[in-house]
Image (spheres, rainbow, N blue to C red):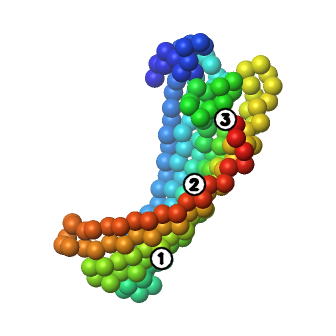
Amino acid sequence: TFDDNIFRSDLNKRSDWRTEITPELRFQSQLPRHVLDFSLDGKIVNYLENTEQDYANLRARAAGALHFDHAHTLSASVLSAIEHEEVGELTTAFTAANPIEVFHNRASVGITRDVGRLYGTLMATFERWDYADVRAIGGDVLDQDPRDTNEFSTALKLGYRFSPGFELIAKMRAVRNMVRGEV
């Protein structure tokens, strides 16, 4: 892909050719009493001239559900990823010289009770974003620790099935974000 403004800036316009490779490997099972889903994927970005902007994302996910009787299902999922914020994105530090590495982790567990037309799910999730320090345009190091975030959430979902393909759903979610500091 040709990009005429890789930094998304009117002050520092640079154009370059960019290649993206997005490999993915996935394993899924659909057994009678449980479901397992494992995946490993990534995104490799390389620039022809501005090689200091190259990066590679990697994400591993596992999810599963166990139907331990006809009315109850226990589900869980985990995600661990190394992601990058490109220079010029809205959330990236204005003076960052390179993409900012972000360690992203999530764990979630839930239980569903299904009694025919009526069902309910209770779920809890923990998620964390840990931002690595990055070199600034002037050569200094930008401390990204104040952006580190922990998020705790719980959710309750209730549903009623009128007929196949039609249902009434009510959802309620409580979220608590704990940010280390302000940037």
Outermost residue, right side? 140
Q: Are marks 1 and 2 in contact (CB under 8 Å)?
A: no
Q: For mark 3, does the 10 Å Cα neighbourhood hold few (<14), some (14 to 19), or many (20 or more) residues?
A: many
Q: Quickly name the residue at label 3.
A: 100
Q: Which mark is residue 111?
A: 1
Q: Residue at x 72, y 45 (%)?
A: 181
Q: Quick one: label 1 or label 2, which is nearer the N terminus?
A: 2
Q: Is residue 33 visible to the viewer in this orientation of the structure?
A: no
Amino acid type, label 2: Ala
Element under disc 1: strand
Q: Position of residue 66 (x, y in %)?
A: 46, 78
Q: Quickly name the residue at label 2.
A: 60
Q: Position of residue 111 (x, y in %)?
A: 47, 76
Amino acid type, label 1: Ile
Q: Is residue 172 visible to the viewer in this orientation of the structure?
A: yes
Q: Quadrant of residue 90?
A: top right
Does residue 25 lie above or below 136 as drawn?
A: below
